Image (tube, rainbow, N blue to C red):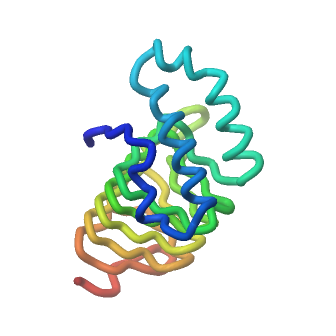
Amino acid sequence: MERSFNIFQDWERNKGNNKARFILCLFRIANLASLNKLYFFLLLPYNMFYRLWVEWIFCCELPFKTVAGRGLVIFHGQALVVNCETIIGSNCTLRPSTTIGNKELSEGIYSASPIIGNNVDIGSNVCIIGPITIGDNVKIGAGSVVVKNVPSNCIIAGNPARVIKTL
């Protein structure tokens, strides 16, 4: 995925949600540290500030290494946990109490993190775990547990999640 570093690239899609706008502007600045080692060291004090504000005060774990396309939407931002190796496509929506991450394969060995396509709408309290790929234009119902690949253009729900409708 091509990285874009306009700190206001999520601004319009989060219209009326000042908390998400603030979190995502801070995230986009912090994300510059993932470009190279020089930026990493220059932004080290900022990234400590970022972690304090976003993770501890806003309770939204969105690491600076996470790759996210433009137009990311965060509703409420409470209890959101995203693994730093996750890749999120453009125009995706994340709702509260969502966990996106890897799983422990054996002691100290972890799987890859999910790759989420473009225009994916993730409901509240969803868990997306493991080395899976979610296609484009997918809607994931609230409370779903996604542990297998998901094709594009569908609606999924359940525990474990399954396709309930093809778009």
Q: Is residue 61 toward the left or the right of residue 159 in the image?
A: right
* Residue, far bottom: 165
Whether residue 149 is visible here, answered yes or no, is yes
Total number of numbered labels?
A: 0
Residue at screen point 49% across, 26% down: 33
Percent coordinates x, y for residue 50 in the rendering: 65, 37
Position of the N terminus, as image quadrant, is top left
Percent coordinates x, y for residue 73 in the rendering: 47, 62
Percent coordinates x, y for residue 58 in the rendering: 71, 53
- Rendered position, 118 above or below 158: above
- Rendered position, 35 above or below 23: above
Position of the C terminus, as image quadrant, is bottom left
Residue at screen point 43% across, 55% down: 10
Whether residue 104 is visible here, answered yes or no, is no
Q: Is residue 46 toward the left or the right of residue 85 in the image?
A: right
Quarter location, residue 146: bottom left
Percent coordinates x, y for residue 56 in the rendering: 76, 46
- Rendered position, 121 above or below 163: above
Along the line of sight, which residue is nearer the eye, 35 or 17?
A: 17
Residue at screen point 48% across, 60% down: 128
Residue at screen point 62% across, 48% down: 61
Quarter location, residue 91: bottom left
Quarter location, residue 107: top right
Q: Is residue 28 toward the left or the right of residue 76 in the image?
A: left
